[in-house]
Amino acid sequence: MFKYLRLSIAALVWLLLAATPSLAQSEAENGATMAEALAKTSLGDWDGAKAIAGRIPDPVAGDIIEWIRLRDGGVEAPWSDYRRFLADHANWPGLELIRSRAEAALPANSRPADILAFFETRPPDTGIGVLRLIEAYQATGRKDEAIKLAIATWTTFSMTKDERVQLYGRFEKTLEKHNVERLDMLLWRDLGDQAEALYELVPEGYPALAKARLGLRARVAGVDGLIAAVPAALKDDPGLNYERFLWRSRKGLYDSARDLMLERSTSAAALGRPEEWSERRRAYARQEMRDGNNARAYQLATRHFLTEGSDYADLEWLAGYIALRKLNDPSLALKHFHLFQTAVGTPISDGRAGYWLGRAYEALGDAEKAKLAYTYGAVNQTSFYGQLAAEKINAGADLTLTGREASPDWRTAGFDGHPVLRAAMLFHYADQPWQTERFIRHFAESQDRTGLQQLAELAIEIGRPQIAVRLSKQAAGMGYVLPKTYFPVTDLARRRLPVDPEVAMSIARRESELDQQVISPAGARGLMQLMPGTARKMSKELGLTYSVAALTDDWSYNATLGSAYLAQQLQDFGGSYILAFVAYNAGPSRARQWIERYGDPRGSGVDQVDWIEHIPFRETRNYVMRVMESLHVYRARISGKVPDLRLSKDLRKG
């Protein structure tokens, strides 16, 4: 399943487009040579790396070496090298770092025209870049633009000491009016050293305010004294109150932290930066909802003062859910669900919007609008709520879920000769999966639906299904659903396991995105993301020799242990998918705790959808929905026939 497959002869010709037939080498030979060159780069032997890369007929091999060299922090290349590469490789990934390095290499005696041309399409990313552009503005009589840039930089940029001294020295009279604004920006960003450098430049009282904010952030001893030293006129500072809230939250002082959040949630100005509060706002609102404090939960969810973004969308949906399911106010819920709908555009979110709008209209007795809303959601049958919406109106199953929709072969996609994709393939054959994915996904950003599908199929063919899954998720974020590669079917589905194939595939896809070699930050390993302790236990129970290396080297070994553990959870929880998936993700003890707290989703008196929405861990809540929605799709993908929608039945299983 996961062995790296050979490309066809046509693909080989495409990969080596620049080579004549007499020079053509096999992809394996090119990969081995590229790996040898890359090894030289890790030693800083750039000449050696370029010489080895030069043995590959495709000149993109040398471009890769130069790309790595110019991104290396230990290299001090002349500005002309950076400028040339940026000009000749404008569509390569990772140019932000090269551009920053280029700005650092800008000579002080550069011609103003060259500087202006360099920054014509993009403003500086670094302090030294700003200084060079200001010099160019001043040299060409564009003084107003120089002042405007100086102010914008002073109030938004992190800079080195030398950069700060130079900028302030040139524009002191102008910038001194913005010192408080700069101090506030630095404190929000927790840049204490730079903030302290401003203490002598800001009005009386502000150093004490800054010390209190930094002390709270660092949780130093004696913070009460630091707060007491803040002048009364500055005690209402939004940043100070945010740090007080954060300090209480981190100390486990839940009630007082919640009360302070509510106290400050009267305006965007009172919050200072509403977006900084939003993640904890969502968590606190859900906690109040779970505790039955529904009016307070609604207040927390609604008083966010955001106007856009994913946090805005999440909080508007949550407010609608609380209004509908807890406050029994469907009219109020509609307002929030409509705001949520206008803020999203992915299949998962559109399915959620349609389903909950339908539920709200249904509660109001408006069957016609409910049906329209459910129809809107039902289009998205790769999503949890899209499937539930489709069930509500007895919609037919989406026949495209089998993945048999015809699409042009990737070999005819017009990718031929594109340097970024050729670079990706060289990385692939050099066994550099991370860079392979980076280059393919960057190339995908410029593709339409067909191009994305073809790239994902290319990833499948070269034996990297994880890239196909991630590309398809990227496509879903752009509004394109690609069932064949969004839900790839691998040899795992054909292996005899103690769980149904759609269950094994859904778990593996969610756990590792079908990447057999991935290791999580927590130490979970391989295809089904097993912790070594769990793997050791299951190996013993199955009479197998335990090998930690095999968890990432042998996908079938990992699948054997993981599916056995999953089957064990299904048995322990009476066949309940919800509880087994919770146990697999968060542990069996969590599943039992939540049964005790929120009821048993296997019971007739418990709404399974509400139960899932009450799972305290956001990751686990999302995990259960994503695995549940995958079951239907994988049934279609594996069988080649789209079965009747049965998510509601799956939720009640057990």
Image: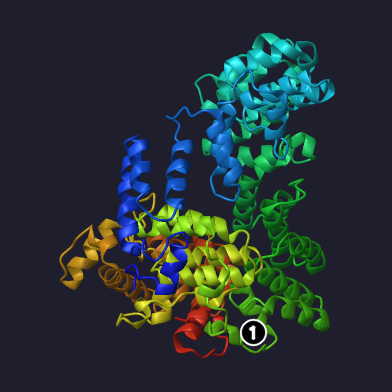
Instruction: Identify whether 602 is placed above or below 197.
Output: below
Query: Which part of the image, by quadrant, shows the N terminus?
Result: bottom left
Residue 319: x and y in percent read: 72, 58
For residue 225, say whether it is visible: no
- Name the foreground residue: 54 vs 249: 54
Residue in the image at 61% along x and 14% along y = 197
Residue 516: x and y in percent read: 34, 64
SS at mark 1 in the image: helix
Residue 217 as seen in the image, left or right of residue 60: right
Q: Quadrant of residue 117?
A: top right
> Which residue is labeled 1 in the image?
391
Residue in the image at 50% along x and 21% along y = 221
- Name the foreground residue: 25 vs 437: 25
What's the coloring here? rainbow
Residue 5 as seen in the image, left or right of residue 191: left
Residue 646 as seen in the image, left or right of residue 345: left
